Image (cartoon, rainbow, N blue to C red):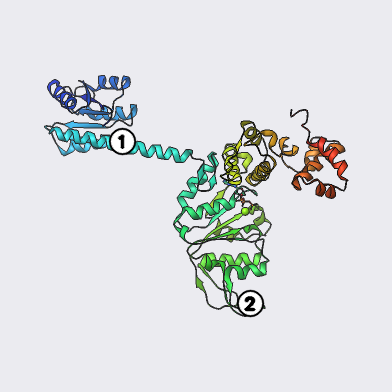
Amino acid sequence: MTEQRRILVVDDDDAMREMVVSLLGDQGYEATGEDAAEPALEHLRAHDVDAVVSDIRMPGMSGLELVGAIHALRPATPVVLMTAFGSIDSAVEAMRAGAFDYITKPFKRDELFLALERAFETRALLEENRRLRRAVDRSSAFGDLIGSSPAMHDIFALMRKVADNRSSVLITGESGTGKEVVARTLHFAGTRKEKPFVPINCTAIPEGLLESELFGHVRGAFTGAHATKRGLFEEAHGGTLFLDEIGDMGPGLQSKLLRVLQDREIRPVGGNQSVKVDVRIVAATNKDLDKEMDSGHFRRDLFYRLNVIPIHIPPLRERPEDVRPLAEALLAKHAGTDSPRRLAPSAIERLMACPWEGNARELENVLERALALSDEEVIGAADLPLGSEMTAAPSGGGNLLRVAVDRRMTLHELGDLYIEETLKQTGGNKVRAAKILGINRRTLYRRGERANAPKADEA
Ligand SMILES: Nc1ncnc2c1ncn2[C@@H]1O[C@H](COP(=O)(O)OP(=O)(O)OP(=O)(O)O)[C@@H](O)[C@H]1O
Ligand SMILES: [Mg+2]
């Protein structure tokens, strides 16, 4: 025990109270006595107390009532009750009232000390738990997934809850919001982490091939199927299959996938034998599946099978708290450990003001380019390659033409913006930019200079 524990002893019996106070004092506690519940509460309001030892039977407020009052006033303060009769009833009552423990009079000194030490241990554990929980709640990452916003914290909590089970997960969110990171993090947070995480992009493979990719095929199933090949479902056995861009899956495959989800078994193309598979399906899409279902492009029954655990990631512009931690993490990821780089406060401020139509992916691109363009350890606002369409933060659509119309730009201003954008696209390569723009390099230099000069309203 490093610091002296303060204990308040409450008993209307003077001899008893004084004896307990002196016992505790001898044991190294700092003990104070009060002869009734009311002055004891007064004392608690005015002083820090680590524990209360109280008699039950007292004139006025009883010890049981005192426990309730202490809970309301100082919920973390444990109370040990002393019962004179040792009846089961008062013991039960004591615990029900919320006392930490009770001792029966007459008691041995060690009984009292033991009850108190246990109370302190329990309280320390509770405090530690609370501290840890607070730290987790406030932390800005869950595995590789970064986020400090309430929305991301809700997602962390949900992921933690479902990481170990097999229910299908459907991740939705705009492009670049981190759907794939969520899928991976979920896999590696759960008991399936020792088994494979198998991602497949449903748009990247033609529908005819996708079926055999997913379910495998037997030899001779189709021209070119020279050997039997295991599908991704089997490869992901015991693990997670990540079906990316599920909104783009063709109708034929949708019904086959639905059957797999219902039966938990697959049938390789050209085969007549089914194979049991234990795979968690995590699907993702940036499409509005409600719309896709209304228009008949996506099967409603498949949607319900996939959407057992929905995770929606809001766009970055609705999570301003995430911009800073994301920017810092993404910068560290691309800068490498040998050349640590920092963002100046002005740069962070500027990043927070951007609309981020492309979400975290766009933020990542901007930072990657900033790293390439500047050698300074500290990256300032001016080093950020943000197009004027970004800093202008147009409401709604972010494309160049929309911005031009919204801001009633002259043709010349639009031209400058287009030049600037093309230079960004080519990574600053003026020869290539000039080619794309169909102007000669001298013109590009002349106009590019002006396009890059700070605008009056930004200075
Ligand atoms: N919360 C996050 N924490 C860490 N990195 C993130 C986060 N969100 C996005 N990223 C990074 O942003 C980039 C885009 O993320 P990801 O590929 O997961 O987006 P997506 O939602 O799958 O986009 P798309 O719909 O275009 O496929 C990745 O490089 C990823 O590492
Ligand atoms: Mg993706």
Residue for badge 1: 123
Q: Quadrant of residue 388?
A: top right
Image quadrant where one finds the C terminus: top right
The residue under the point 52% across, 46% down is: 155
* Mark 2 touches mark 1? (CB < 8 Å): no
Compare marks 2 and 1 and give the one earlier in the sequence: 1
Mark 2, residues whose alpha carbon is within 10 Å: few (<14), some, or many (≥20)? some
Q: Residues within 10 Å of mark 1 (few under 14, many from 20)?
A: some
The quarter holding residue 358 reads top right
Give the label on residue 225, or none: 2
Q: Residue furthest front?
A: 338
Is 52 drawn above or below residue 417 in the view shown? Answer: above
Image coordinates for residue 166, horizontal then vertical, percent: 47, 59
Kindly give the residue lying farthest to the bottom in the view shown: 220
Determine if residue 98 is in view.
no
- Residue at image point 52% right, 55% down: 308
Give the residue at x 78% y 36%. Answer: 452
